[in-house]
Amino acid sequence: MIVDHFPLLGLRLTTPRLELRLPSPEELAALAELAAEGIHPPETMPFLVPWTNGTPAEIARGVVQHYWRQLGTWTPQDWSLNLTVLHAGAVVGTQGISGRDLAITRQVGTGSWLGRRHQGQGIGTEMRAAVLHLAFAGLGVQEAVSSAFEDNHASLAVSRKLGYQPDGIERRAIREALVIDHRRRLTRAAWEHHNTTPVTIEGLAPCLPLFGLDPA
């Protein structure tokens, strides 16, 4: 079976409302179509790489290509896992977690997006809590980092709720204008204090070498 050769296909996170895993081809198509419908108001750009510029067809194709690219270039020293998020069986967005030299740095970064019709329901908090559980409880990390532009109030609110602390700013040029990027950092101690979302991890053990970690 293909999961024997690429065990990430068997990795699954579940929370009270959500399931996070790599998508089937049909679910990847649904994710691409969801992005093409819109993620944010057209007058804003919450992403450092403005991948939501373009026609709906270009955006959808970009989602598929990005997904394939991240898996195709995966190494244990430098990886980025983009899990599709399902709510009540429907694709609602994607939650990413990435790391470099994880066995040494013990640090991960996260990034995500939700289809606009699924925003404002607490899903963003729950899906980030899921990958933080994977990071701290499953992969043994010590810190997680994230960032959001100053007008991305939803993302910054999720970080506050989950215990992240300010970690400085970056000055970015987005659409030929200055944007302030607010970095956030979550320590293991803060995660343990704020961790209230029940999360179940399935299929992690055979994936550990792919994350650059010794098998359990």
Image: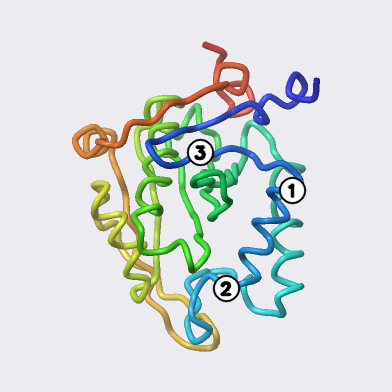
Q: Quadrant of residue 149?
A: bottom left
Residue identified by numbered label 1: 26
- Mark 2 or mark 1: name the one nearer the start of the chain: 1
Residue under pointer 2: 38
Could you say which quadrant of the image residue 190 lies in?
top left
In the rendered image, the residue lying farthest to the left is: 193
Residue at image coords 72%, 66%: 60
The answer to the question of whether label 2 and label 1 lie on touching residues, with beta carbons closer than 8 A, is no
Q: Residue at x 57, y 50 (%)?
A: 90
Q: Amino acid at mark 1?
A: Glu
Structural distance between the alpha carbons of marks 3 and 1: 16 Å
Other residues around mark 2 within 10 Å, as few (<14) / some (14–19) / many (≥20): some
Q: Quadrant of residue 81?
A: top right
Q: Residues within 10 Å of mark 3 (few under 14, many from 20)?
A: many
| Mark 2–mark 1 distance (CA, rounded to whole Å) | 19 Å
Residue at which label 3 appears: 19
- Give the x, y percent position of residue 6: 73, 27
Mark seen at residue 2 = none
2 vs 1, front mark: 1
Q: Position of residue 216 (x, y in %)?
A: 52, 11
Q: Give the residue type that dot 2 points to.
A: Gly
Q: Is residue 9 left or right of residue 187?
A: right
Query: Mark 3 falls on what kind of element?
Result: strand
Q: Which residue occupies 35% across, 39% down?
A: 143
Secondary structure beneath label 2: loop
